[in-house]
Image (spheres, rainbow, N blue to C red):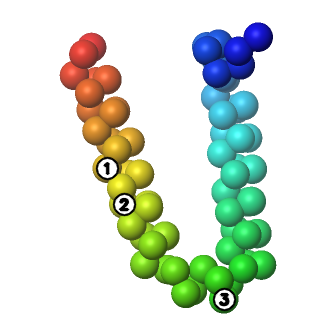
């Protein structure tokens, strides 16, 4: 059984719970590894900006099709 090929449907509250959990995990990792993240702070920003641009591009492409 290939889990990656299956399509999933999430309810709003389920997706919100997942995102809240991931946010909490990110905050905890940031607190525990403060010195590590401070040394590569610029790289974190680059990853964020690239991810944001790709996400917006995919979203606009989807909206254009509809």
Residue visible at 64% across and 28% down in the picture: 12
Q: Secondary structure at mark 3?
A: helix
Q: Position of residue 1 (x, y in %)?
A: 76, 11
Does 22 sit above or below residue 34? above
Q: Please tell me which residue lies in front, 31 or 10.
A: 31
N-term mark: 3 or 2: 3
Residue visible at 66% across and 39% down in the picture: 16
Q: Which residue is mark 2?
A: 49
Q: Secondary structure at mark 1?
A: helix
Residue visible at 44% across and 61% down in the picture: 47
N-term mark: 3 or 1: 3
Q: Please tell me which residue lies in front, 57 or 1.
A: 1
Q: Secondary structure at mark 2?
A: helix
Q: Please tell me which residue lies in front, 57 or 21.
A: 57
Residue visible at 45% across and 73% down in the picture: 43
Q: Position of residue 5 (x, y in %)?
A: 61, 15
Q: Which residue is mark 3?
A: 35
Q: Place residue 63 in its image quadrant.
A: top left
Image marks 2 and 1: residues in contact by CB distance under 8 Å? yes
- The quarter of the image holding the C terminus is top left
| Image disc number at residue 53 | 1
Could you tell me how far apart the alpha carbons at marks 2 and 1 are, in whole angstroms? Answer: 6 Å
Q: Position of residue 39 (x, y in %)?
A: 55, 87
Q: Position of residue 9 (x, y in %)?
A: 64, 17
Does 8 sit above or below residue 34? above
Image marks 3 and 1: residues in contact by CB distance under 8 Å? no
């Amino acid at each position: 059984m290939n889990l990656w090929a299956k399509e999933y449907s999430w309810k709003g509250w389920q997706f919100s719970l997942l995102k809240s959990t991931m946010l909490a995990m990110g905050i905890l990792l940031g607190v525990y590894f403060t010195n590590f993240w401070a040394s590569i702070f610029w790289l974190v920003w680059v990853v964020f900006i690239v991810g944001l641009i790709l996400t917006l591009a995919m979203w606009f492409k989807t909206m254009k099709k509809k």
